[in-house]
Image (spheres, grey):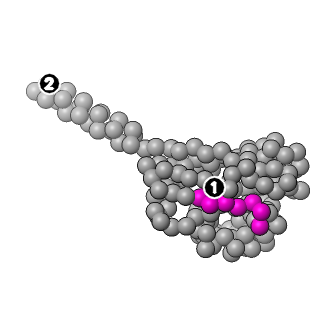
Amino acid sequence: MKTIRMIACLSLAFAASSAFAADKVCKVEISGTDQMQFDKKEIAVAADCTEVEVTLKHTGKLPAQAMGHNWVLAKTSDLAGVASDGMGAGLPNDYIKKGDARVLAHTKVIGGGQAATVKFATSALKKGEAYSFLCTFPGHSSLMKGAFKFG
């Protein structure tokens, strides 16, 4: 009887550890400058990633109020609306309209020398859908954007 219980416990422990091993967090770093540029025009994430962790670094020196940057993920078709609505949201809201369902993930607005990280599940993304990232600080989205590829 003890042997059966031990085998059952070991089987459960193995199954639990296998479930955790199946999770794959893919980490990405991107930088923004005082010249309103991201250092990447494209980010590609493999289909086996269950979560994505994006770290935005501001390599400039200007403060967030003057030259702040954030990293925002949305469907490509939603970029213009997200950027437009974000401008009215203001710095206290990280230039993201409150409750904007078009925003799939975003960091806070940061200034020179700072960094921010956002982690999100890929289960919200659909293979074959066109996604993009941008900075929603007023006037930045025309230059600070790129393609986000999943799959």
Say which quarter of the image contains residue 84.
bottom right
Residue 27 within the magenta-colored segment of the rendering: no
* Range drawn in magenta: 142-148
Q: Is residue 91 visible?
A: yes
Q: Is residue 53 rendered to the left or right of residue 83?
A: left
Which three-letter amino acid code belongs to the residue tagged 2?
Lys
Q: Position of residue 124 (x, y in %)?
A: 49, 61
Whole-Å distance between the Cαs marked 2 and 1? 56 Å
Q: Quadrant of the N terminus?
A: top left
**Res. 93 in view:** no
Residue at screen point 61% across, 69% down: 76
Q: Which residue, given by chain and number where applicable, does mark 1 sit on? A: 42
Disc 2: which residue: 2
Could you tell me residue 99's position as x and y percent?
63, 69
Are there few (<14), some (14-19), or many (20+) residues within 10 Å of tag 2? few
| Residue at 71% in and 65% down | 96
Residue 100 in which image quadrant: bottom right
Q: Please tell me the numbered disc located at residue 74.
A: none
